[in-house]
Image: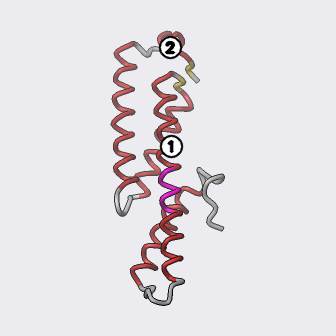
Amino acid sequence: PVQGSHLANNCGLTQSSRLTLSGELQHLLQLLRFELHSEKPEMERVLKLLKSFHCIERYIVIEDVVNIAEEVRNQISIFIEKRIALIEAEVKRGTFAEQNFGEANASTIKMALSCLESLEHDYPNKVNCS
């Protein structure tokens, strides 16, 4: 891995390259946020973005990359927490006799579980669908 600004400069990351990399990472982070906050996130796209972030984080260890990687982890944690809360809320709704538990509720739970299952491999300490 390339660690620190001094090594990054010696390995070909000029100031201009670092700024370009930082801008692209911000763009990818916005795409990830968009997907994670959408009603029906495309998990295949989310996983591709996460793979890109993991790869960059692994090989380029400079402040900009470290900060973006931390924000990615925060966004994923929030997403997981929201999906778990959604499942719990739907299950709780189903336990009240005065509220009908229908196809829409089941569909919501199925979609949330599907999203969590997609992340289970990369985030086993946060997601356990077994």
> Measured along the vertical axis of the image, is residue 30 above or below residue 129?
above
Q: Is residue 26 above or below residue 36?
A: above
Numbered disc total: 2
Could you tell me residue 115's position as x and y percent?
48, 62
In the image, is residue 100 part of the stretch drawn in magenta?
Answer: no
How many neighbours does mark 2 have within 10 angstroms: few (below 14), some (14-19), or many (20 or more)?
Answer: some
- Give the percent coordinates (x, y) of residue 10: 50, 9
Q: Which mark is residue 74?
A: 1
The circle on residue 31 is none
- What secondary structure is found at the residue carrying circle 2? helix
**Which amino acid, by three-letter code, is at mark 2?**
Ser
Amino acid at pointer 1:
Asn
Q: Which residue is mark 2?
A: 5
Say which residue appears at 45% left-offset and 25% top-offset. Answer: 64
Tell me the residue at 45%/85% (across/down): 101
Is the residue marked by circle 1 packed among few (<14), some (14-19), or many (20+) residues within 10 Å? Answer: few
Who comes first in sequence, dot 1 or dot 2? Answer: 2
In this rendering, the answer to whether 6 lies above or below 68 is above
Q: Give the residue at x 52% y 28%.
A: 66
The quadrant of the rendering that contains the C terminus is: bottom right
Locate residue 57, reporting x and y percent: 53, 32
Which label lies toward us, 1 or 2?
Answer: 1
Secondary structure predominantly adopted by residues drawn in magenta: helix
Q: Position of residue 3 (x, y in %)?
A: 57, 19
Quadrant where the N terminus sits is: top right
The foreground one among 109 and 16 is 109
**Mark pair 1, 2: CA separation:** 24 Å
Q: Please state the extent of the stretch shown in magenta in the rendering.
A: 78-83
